[in-house]
Amino acid sequence: MQNSALHQIYCRKFFQGTWHEIQDVVPPEVQIHIRWPDSTHSLWAFPHELHDLALGHAALELCAPREEPVYINHQETTFTLRPSLWEGSPVCTPRYT
């Protein structure tokens, strides 16, 4: 994991009709890559719990209805995922008659 310390920057802010010199604090970001079976997606994120971010992004943006992302592996900031049928979906739930 990379350094997650906040960075101080000097900048100018327009406030009440005039420019002011200020100090601000910004979080660092790292680029992560999500490998999906037919594509690769890149995101910028604060370097904390990136595994959860990769799974959440895949669930919201890449999975079809009744699918959930499954973690395969990762190297550095590249996460390999694949879709799987959601076990609670009507497709996977046994039907009793």
Image: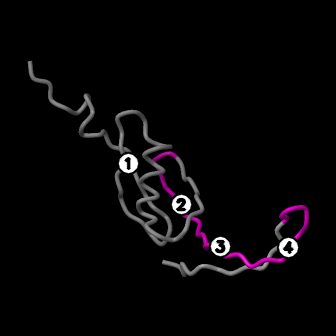
For the image shown, how many numbered marks are present on the structure? Answer: 4
Which residue in the rendered view is the most extreme toward the front?
16
> Is there CB contact under 8 Å for labels 4 and 3?
no
Compared to residue 24, the image places residue 33 above or below, namely above
Q: Amino acid at mark 1?
A: Pro
Q: Position of residue 85 (x, y in %)?
A: 31, 39
Q: Earlier in the sequence, mark 3 or mark 2?
A: 3
Please give the residue where the numbered disc 3 appears in the rendered image: 26
Compared to residue 61, the image places residue 78 above or below, namely below
Pick the residue in front: 47 or 24.
Answer: 24
Residue sitting at 46 percent across and 48 percent down? 58
Pick the residue in front: 88 or 22.
Answer: 22
Q: Amino acid at mark 3?
A: Val
* 57 horizontally vs 82: left or right: right
Please give the residue where the numbered disc 4 appears in the rendered image: 20
- Residue 33 badge: 2
Query: Mark 2: which secondary structure?
Result: strand
Compared to residue 50, the image places residue 91 above or below, namely above
Q: Nearer the viewer, mark 4 or mark 3?
A: 4
Q: Nearer the viewer, mark 1 or mark 4?
A: 4
Query: Mark 3: which secondary structure?
Result: strand
Q: Earlier in the sequence, mark 1 or mark 2?
A: 2
**Dot 4: few (<14), some (14–19), or many (≥20) neighbours within 10 Å?**
few
Residue sitting at 25 percent across and 28 percent down? 90
Residue sitting at 50 percent across and 43 percent down? 61
